[in-house]
Image: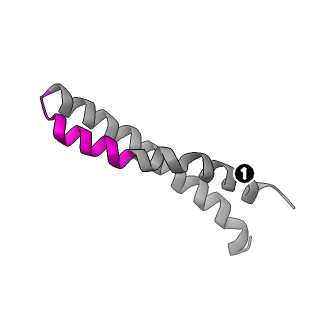
Amino acid sequence: MSNADLLPSLLFKINENQLALEAAIMELTLWAEQRGASEVSGNVRGALEAIGRNEEFIKMTLAVLMTPE
């Protein structure tokens, strides 16, 4: 298997890790909110918005990369 063949699978796994980290960070954000850290949780939610904004593009690009020619 060539390096070019491995790239889509690698990117897919990295994206899965990113989404798992997003979920874990959101859980911590909810925990912080429950303890009154609303400013911190607001900052975290703002940072996590970038993942949401980019998610669809990443999924579409991975689908194209993983489609056999």
Residue situated furthest left in the rendering: 36
Q: Which residue is drawn at 40% across and 38% down?
A: 23
- Name the residue that disc number 1 marks: 63
Q: Which residue is drawn at 26% across and 36% down?
A: 29
Residue type at mark 1: give it: Ala
In the picture, residue 66 is in which quadrant? bottom right
Q: Main secondary structure of the magenta part?
A: helix
Residue 46 spot, x, y in % from top left: 33, 45
Q: Which residue is drawn at 40% across and 43% down?
A: 22
Residue 48 spot, x, y in % from top left: 38, 45
Q: In this view, does 27 lie to the left or right of 53?
A: left
Residue situated furthest bottom in the rendering: 3
Q: Is residue 69 left or right of residue 20?
A: right
Residue situated furthest top in the rendering: 34
> Is the C terminus in the top left, top right, bottom left or bottom right quadrant?
bottom right
Taking depth in this image into account, of 66 and 34 the one nearest to the observer is: 34
Q: Which residue is drawn at 33% across and 37% down?
A: 26
Magenta stretch in the rendered image:
35-48
Residue 39 spot, x, y in % from top left: 17, 39
Q: Is residue 46 left or right of residue 65?
A: left
Classify mark 1: residues with Cα within 10 Å, few (<14), some (14-19) or many (20+).
few
Residue 46 is one of the magenta-drawn residues: yes
Q: In this view, does 6 lie to the left or right of 43?
A: right
Residue 31 spot, x, y in % from top left: 22, 30
Taking depth in this image into account, of 5 and 61 the one nearest to the observer is: 61
Q: Is mark 1 on a helix, strand or loop?
A: helix
Residue 14 is one of the magenta-drawn residues: no
